[in-house]
Image: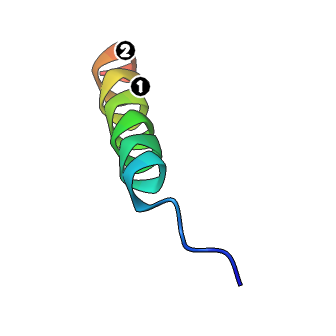
Amino acid sequence: GNPKPSVSWIKGEMVVKENARIAVLDSG
């Protein structure tokens, strides 16, 4: 199998968390 792209996965999760934080700030 292919090795997991851990760096890009972590970066992607960081982007998701940042977007969620911005969405919370926008809504409230």
Residue 8: x percent and y percent? 46, 47
Residue 6: x percent and y percent? 42, 61
For disc 2, the marked residue is 26
Tag 1 secondary structure = helix
Tag 2 secondary structure = helix
Spatial distance from mark 1 to mark 2, Cα to Cα?
A: 5 Å
Q: Say which residue appears at 30% left-offset and 32% top-offset.
A: 21
Q: Is residue 19 above or below residue 17?
A: above
Looking at the image, residue 27 sits to the left or right of residue 25; the answer is right
Which residue is at the front of the view, 10 or 22? Answer: 10
Decide: few, some or many residues near mark 1? Use Cα within 10 Å; few <14, some 14-19, many ≥20. Answer: few
Q: Say which residue appears at 42% left-offset and 29% top-offset.
A: 19
Decide: few, some or many residues near mark 2? Use Cα within 10 Å; few <14, some 14-19, many ≥20. Answer: few
Q: Is residue 21 above or below residue 11?
A: above
Q: Is residue 3 above or below residue 17?
A: below
Quadrant of the snapshot with the N terminus: bottom right
Q: Say which residue appears at 33% left-offset and 42% top-offset.
A: 14
Most distant residue in the top direction: 26
Residue 9: x percent and y percent? 47, 54
Residue 26: x percent and y percent? 37, 14
Most distant residue in the bottom direction: 1
The color scheme shown is: rainbow
The kind of residue tagged 2 is Asp
Quadrant of the snapshot with the C terminus: top left
The kind of residue tagged 1 is Ala
Q: Say which residue appears at 40% left-offset and 34% top-offset.
A: 15
For disc 1, the marked residue is 23
State if disc 2 and disc 1 touch (CB < 8 Å). Answer: yes
